[in-house]
Amino acid sequence: MFGKKRNIENMKLLKYVETDTEACVVASLLDSCGIYSYMDYDGIGGSLKVVIGNTNLGVNIYVKPEDYDSAKAIIDTQSATLYEV
């Protein structure tokens, strides 16, 4: 239903990212590892996503509590790999 916010009460905040693009990369990585995630857009970010296709107003990424430790390890490992010189 339009305007109805997804219930995230039973989910745990994994990570906050600045852009929709980064959120999509994180969600895709988690999905490839079999972990369901949900992206929750700050403020009018969700509306901007619909209107212009992208937002830089921040995105919260949530996972199920039972997946949190695995998801955190995956994100931390990938982040460390990205910044290796």
Image: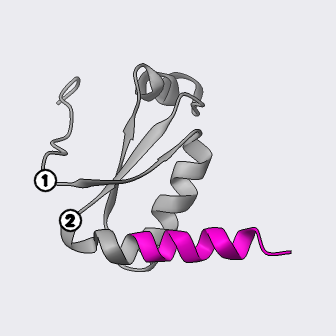
Res 13 visible: yes
- Label 2 residue SS: helix
Can you give x and y, in whole percent of width and height, for residue 36 in the image?
Answer: 31, 66
Mark 1 falls on what kind of element?
Answer: loop
Q: Nearer the viewer, residue 67 or 28?
A: 67
Q: Is residue 35 visible?
A: no
Is 65 left or right of 82, judged from the image as shown?
left
Q: Quadrant of the N terminus?
A: top left
Residue 53 belongs to the span the image colors magenta = no
Residue 84 painted magenta: yes
- Residue 10 is tagged as 1
Q: Is residue 83 left or right of residue 11?
A: right
Q: Pick whichever of labels 1 and 2 is earlier in the sequence.
A: 1
The region drawn magenta spans 72-85
Left/right of residue 43 with respect to residue 7 in the rendered view: right
Give the dominant element type of the magenta stretch: helix, strand or loop: helix
Is 8 placed above or below 4 here?
below
| Residue at x 46%, y 39% (from the top left corner) | 59
Question: What residue appears at the point 20 percent right and 72 percent down from the top-left corner?
Answer: 66
Q: Residue at x 76, y 68 (%)?
A: 83
Few, some or many residues within 10 Å of mark 1 (<14, 14–19, 20+): few
Q: Classify 10 Å Cα crowding around label 2: few (below 14), some (14-19), many (20 and above).
A: some
Kindly identify the residue that appears in the image at 51 percent across and 23 percent down: 48
Identity of the amino acid at label 2? Pro
Residue 29 horizontal/vertical position (percent): 51, 70
